[in-house]
Image (cartoon, rainbow, N blue to C red):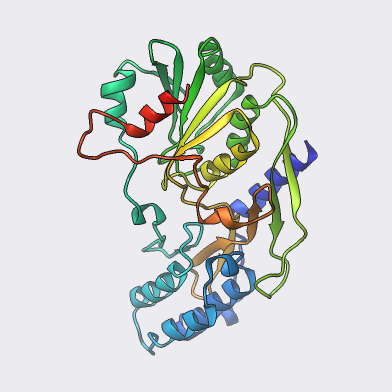
């Protein structure tokens, strides 16, 4: 449990930007100064250069050539954000008082979720709402369908007790995390603990510790203990896609340690590294991943997307059917 609490503390630490304010004599709107500062901070602290095979020196040369004296703040923002987007990581952002940059990984893939199709053809408009969860019975009440679109909202034990009690007599549960953009990691762990019967190592983590791209701390295991109360340890199928990001992608990765859970859909959008950042000389804020989350083999590869056990794509020519949900039903 201490390892779990350590990781939660780490998440809280890195989920907020490091408030790095500049003394008056260090403040600058000069495009070259701000470019060099941002490039250098990423070079020393970003955690996935090697995995993503990014030539950061080449990136510097490419975008530094676009700078010029007297360029507008909007033009500078476009150059800096384009440079950051070379990392293809939605935990990498630049924030000014007029714009926020993001990569948009999920838009690189075909969408694999349509809520209206599920409501109209599977769970009816009379589905139940419990906090952030939308849910109902499926397959003549033999299965429970639970939709969770975000981990950002409050998830408390009373909500989970109510939902899992409702479906305790089913053959299994389908947990739909498609298009779940993440949120609070503690919420992901709170839910995961309801699906295990014994303490389980679910991942490893390591932190960037030096200026070289491969300088990291030794991997530290993260384990979860089962909730001391209402649990559901029968079969669970978790639905994922490219919109399953950050805490939701971490949830998917952790289920690889559970024998009773199957991942189904498309690979996730990643976002397994904890973001941290600071302030540029001109006052803009930045953040990027400074840790690596490792799978049970202590590999960082699933940052490029947690892979499903069964890959399925919906057919957008027939919105009366959700092939991903249909295949999930067929697993029971």
> Relative to 198, is 100 above or below?
below
Task: Please identify the quarter of the rendering in which residue 252 is found.
Answer: top right
Q: Nearer the viewer, residue 285 or 323?
A: 323
Asked whether, in this view, residue 179 is left or right of residue 228, the answer is left
> Relative to 108, is 54 above or below?
below
Q: Residue at x 20, y 39 (%)?
A: 317
Q: Residue at x 49, y 83 (%)?
A: 58
> Relative to 18, is 222 above or below?
above
Q: Nearer the viewer, residue 313 or 277?
A: 313
* Number of disc labels: 0
Q: Residue at x 42, y 82 (%)?
A: 63
Question: Residue 120, position in %: x, y?
Answer: 26, 23
Question: Residue 183, position in %: x, y?
Answer: 52, 42
Question: Residue 286, position in %: x, y?
Answer: 52, 65
Question: Residue 92, position in %: x, y?
Answer: 50, 62
Asked whether, in this view, residue 315 is left or right of residue 174, the answer is left
- Locate the N terminus by quadrant: top right
Q: Nearer the viewer, residue 27 or 94?
A: 94
């Amino acid at each position: 449990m201490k390892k779990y609490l350590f990781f939660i503390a780490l998440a809280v630490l890195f989920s907020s930007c490091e408030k790095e304010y500049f003394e008056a004599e260090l403040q600058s709107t000069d495009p070259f100064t701000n470019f060099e500062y941002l490039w250098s901070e990423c070079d020393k602290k970003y955690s996935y250069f090697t995995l993503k095979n990014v030539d950061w020196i080449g990136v510097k040369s490419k975008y530094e050539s676009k700078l010029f004296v007297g360029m507008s703040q909007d033009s500078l923002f476009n150059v800096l954000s384009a440079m950051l987007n070379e990392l293809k990581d939605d935990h990498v952002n630049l924030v000014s008082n007029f714009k926020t940059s993001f990569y948009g990984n999920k838009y690189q893939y075909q969408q694999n979720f349509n809520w209206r199709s599920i409501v109209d053809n599977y769970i009816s408009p009379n589905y139940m709402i419990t906090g952030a969860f939308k849910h109902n019975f499926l397959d003549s009440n033999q299965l429970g369908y639970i939709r969770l679109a975000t981990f950002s909202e409050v998830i408390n034990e009373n909500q989970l007790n109510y939902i899992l009690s409702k479906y305790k007599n089913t053959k299994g549960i389908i947990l739909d995390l498609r298009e779940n953009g993440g949120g609070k990691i503690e919420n992901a762990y709170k839910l995961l603990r309801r699906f295990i019967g014994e303490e389980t190592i679910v991942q490893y983590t390591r932190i960037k510790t030096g200026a070289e791209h491969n300088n990291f701390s030794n991997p530290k295991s993260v384990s979860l203990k089962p909730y001391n109360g209402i649990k559901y340890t029968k079969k669970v199928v978790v639905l994922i896609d490219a919109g399953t990001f950050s805490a939701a992608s971490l949830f998917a990765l952790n289920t690889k340690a559970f024998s009773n859970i199957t991942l189904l859909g498309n690979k996730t959008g990643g976002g397994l590294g904890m973001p941290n950042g600071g302030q540029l000389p001109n006052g803009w804020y930045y953040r990027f991943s400074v840790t690596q989350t490792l799978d049970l083999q202590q590999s960082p590869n699933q940052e490029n997307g947690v892979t499903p056990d069964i890959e399925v794509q919906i057919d957008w020519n027939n919105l009366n059917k959700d092939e991903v949900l249909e295949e999930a039903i067929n697993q029971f």
